[in-house]
Amino acid sequence: MEDKIKFRTIEEYVSSFPENVVTLLVKLRAAIRNVVPDAEEVISYNIGSFKLNGSVVIYYAGWKQHISIYPVPSGNAAFKKAVSPYLSGKSTLKFPIDEPIPWKLIAEAVEFSLADNGNIQKAKKSGGKSPKKVAKK
């Protein structure tokens, strides 16, 4: 089995993909950056992520057949319905590279993730549990 590459920079990560995936990752990064312009872009779990105030807002990844964002934010009923065709497992949105990418939906996901992140930060500061954990009870 081949040793897995450990990426040190976003540029290393993005450039490791075929040109068609690189193009989509560049657009994905721009779409996320548009929502969180002050976020720091870093490698985390060997994929790209955007951090704000010390917490990851969203992770993103490229694959041979799709691009993904993680985790799926809580959103609202309309958002949940809109992302349902892209949902993979509990916490991944997969967007096939051979289909039109729903950029507005991705921006909405980042906005909801940012809101979730803000709520989690507030819960941590007050010593409480994250809203997602409380909601699962």
Image (cartoon, rainbow, N blue to C red):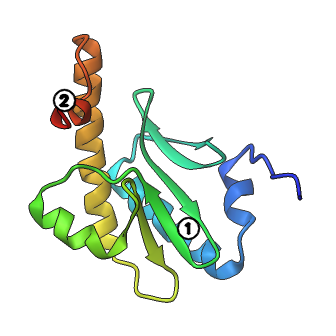
Between 54 and 30, the residue placed more toward the observer is 54
In the depicted structure, whether residue 37 falls above or below residue 29? above
Residue 4 shown left or right of residue 22 in the figure: right
Q: Secondary structure at mark 2?
A: helix
Q: Mark 1 or mark 2: which is in front?
A: 2
- Residue under pointer 2: 134
- Mark 1 surroundings within 10 Å by alpha-carbon count, few (fewer than 14), some (14 through 19), many (20 or more): many
Q: Residue at x 45, y 27 (%)?
A: 54
Most distant residue in the top direction: 127
Q: Amino acid at mark 2?
A: Val
Residue 78 shown left or right of residue 125 in the figure: left
Nearest to N terminus: mark 1 or mark 2: 1
Q: Which mark is drawn over residue 25?
A: 1
| Quadrant where the N terminus is found in the figure | bottom right
Q: Residue at x 51, y 56 (%)?
A: 60
Residue 46 shown left or right of residue 27 in the figure: right
Residue 21 lies in quadrant: bottom right
x and y percentages locating residue 32 in the rendered image: 40, 57
Q: Amino acid at mark 1?
A: Leu
Q: Residue at x 58, y 79 (%)?
A: 65
In the depicted structure, whether residue 63 falls above or below residue 128? below
Report if the CB atoms under discs 1 and 2 are less than 8 Å apart. no
Residue 56 shown left or right of residue 25 in the figure: left
Residue 24 lies in quadrant: bottom right
